[in-house]
Amino acid sequence: MTLPQIVLIAAAAIALAFAVRRAYLRAVIRQIGPRELQELLPRQSDVVLLDVRNADERARDHIKGSLHVPVGDLLRKIDTLEKHRNRLIVVYCQTGSRSLAAAATLRKHGFQVANLKGGMGEWNFSART
């Protein structure tokens, strides 16, 4: 086997591993669509929205009333979410990928979590339809 073939096989294996991990997380983390979230929001005492995007993304657009902890800061600031431990934390980002990873981290730490399916992109599209 040549070096380029080995590199190609390794890259394919890594891509497959990421795809399997993402599929697994989608299976174990509750996925909430924009319409379902809109139905949950009036019960604000039961739901916390968590935006895990960076500050620039949040400055352009965010869901009113959401908390902000960038995904890179989540472990360092997880104690700030402790007061919400008994509430459903709906995590969102721009597309639903970073928030899925963040939701998995929160779940590992004992939080009740869900991921906003499709992130802000779906949320904004849903608002227009």
Image: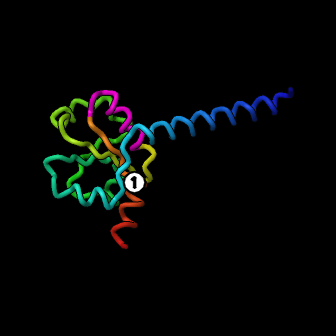
Secondary structure state at the residue bearing disc 1 = helix
Q: Is residue 53 among what the camera can see?
A: no
Answer with left or right where residue 92 lies relative to residue 23. Answer: left
Q: Position of residue 122 (x, y in %)?
A: 41, 60
Q: How many marks?
A: 1
Which residue is at 24% across, 59% downward? 39
Answer with left or right where residue 63 lies relative to residue 44. Answer: right
Task: Name which quarter of the figure residue 72 lies in.
Answer: top left
Q: Is residue 113 among what the camera can see?
A: yes
Q: Position of residue 127 (x, y in %)?
A: 33, 68
Q: Position of residue 110 (x, y in %)?
A: 27, 28
Which residue is at 57% across, 39% downward? 19
Q: Nearer the viewer, residue 100 or 32?
A: 32
Q: What residue is shown with label 1?
A: 119
Q: Nearer the viewer, residue 47 or 68?
A: 47
**Overall secondary structure of the magenta stretch?**
helix
Is residue 73 depicted above or below 120 in this figure?
A: above
Q: Point out the image quarter for the C terminus.
A: bottom left
**Callout 1, which amino acid?**
Gly
Which residue is at 59% across, 33% downward? 17
Which residue is at 75% across, 35% downward? 8
Is residue 20 depicted above or below 43 in this figure?
A: above
Any magenta on residue 24?
A: no
Q: Position of residue 12 (x, y in %)?
A: 69, 36
Is residue 35 depicted above or below 69 in this figure?
A: below
Range covered by the magenta-colored residues: 99-111
Any magenta on residue 103?
A: yes
Answer with left or right where residue 42 lies relative to residue 94. Answer: left
